[in-house]
Image (cartoon, rainbow, N blue to C red):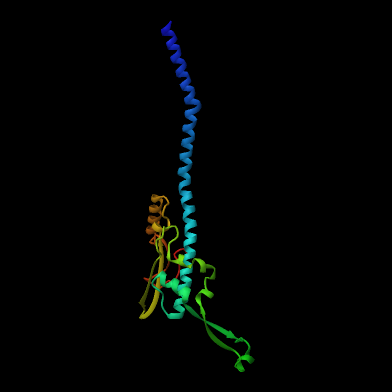
Amino acid sequence: MRESASVAENNINVHIMKKIITLVILPLLIIGGVYLLVASIMEPVNFNNNVKNRETIAIERLKDIRTLQVAYKSEYGRFLPTTDSLVDFYKNGQITIVRQIGSMDDSLAVAQKKVRRDSIKLFVRDTLLRHRAATIDSLNFIPFSGGKRVNMEAVIKVVSGVNVPLFEASMSYDDLLKGLDRQLIINLKAEKEDMGRYPGLKVGSVTQPNNNAGNWE
């Protein structure tokens, strides 16, 4: 009798455990599996979205650097070698603005010498990137990098017997994408390198003239 009761009790316990597994544990395992599956699918999607957002901010910064470099070259015939010197040029430098009075299409005014051009000096900060004045020091740094500085060079290169000023400013993916999935960063870098492209963002070139183009353009 006791043995029969014990067997019956064991059967009930087994039945209860099966119910618990079926109704509680199995659904949790299924939910966990679905979550892992969705996470594995979304991980590269989220990575690509983060890359795009970070690149957008970085590109604007590199465009600002290019704007100031071009302005400096127009004034002095060369480029600046560091972002510190570029920021100082923005804060304290001046550029020449040519202002035309009258129109060359007005033949009478031309004949009467009423058409002329005047050159005036204006502070850079009053003419260029005025929307950036409060944050101009950020041009020194790669966004999202934890304080890594933008890599910049300026050289004079002889091209077809002519001295040509060149500059290059760059942000590597290792710095720009800091904190994102390491393996996906490695994959992205390898993809760019296989295409013969710089693994990051870059404007200008110190190896050959490229009209100060960015590698995103």
In the picture, which quadrant includes the N terminus?
A: top left
- The residue under the point 44% across, 9% down is 5
Whether 49 is drawn above or below 35: the answer is: below
Residue 42 visible in the picture: yes
Whether 151 is drawn above or below 38: the answer is: below
Number of marks in the image? Answer: 0
Q: Quadrant of residue 103?
A: bottom right
Closest to the observer: 211 or 24?
A: 24
Residue most toward the top?
Answer: 1
- Measuring from the top left, give residue 190's x and y in whole percent: 37, 55
- Measuring from the top left, give residue 85's x and y in whole percent: 41, 72
- The residue under the point 47% across, 29% down is 26
Q: Quadrant of residue 8?
A: top left
- The residue under the point 48% across, 37% down is 34
Q: Is residue 2 left or right of residue 119?
A: left
- Measuring from the top left, give residue 209's x and y in whole percent: 41, 73
Closest to the observer: 30 or 141?
A: 141
Residue 211 visible in the picture: no
Closest to the observer: 93 or 117?
A: 93
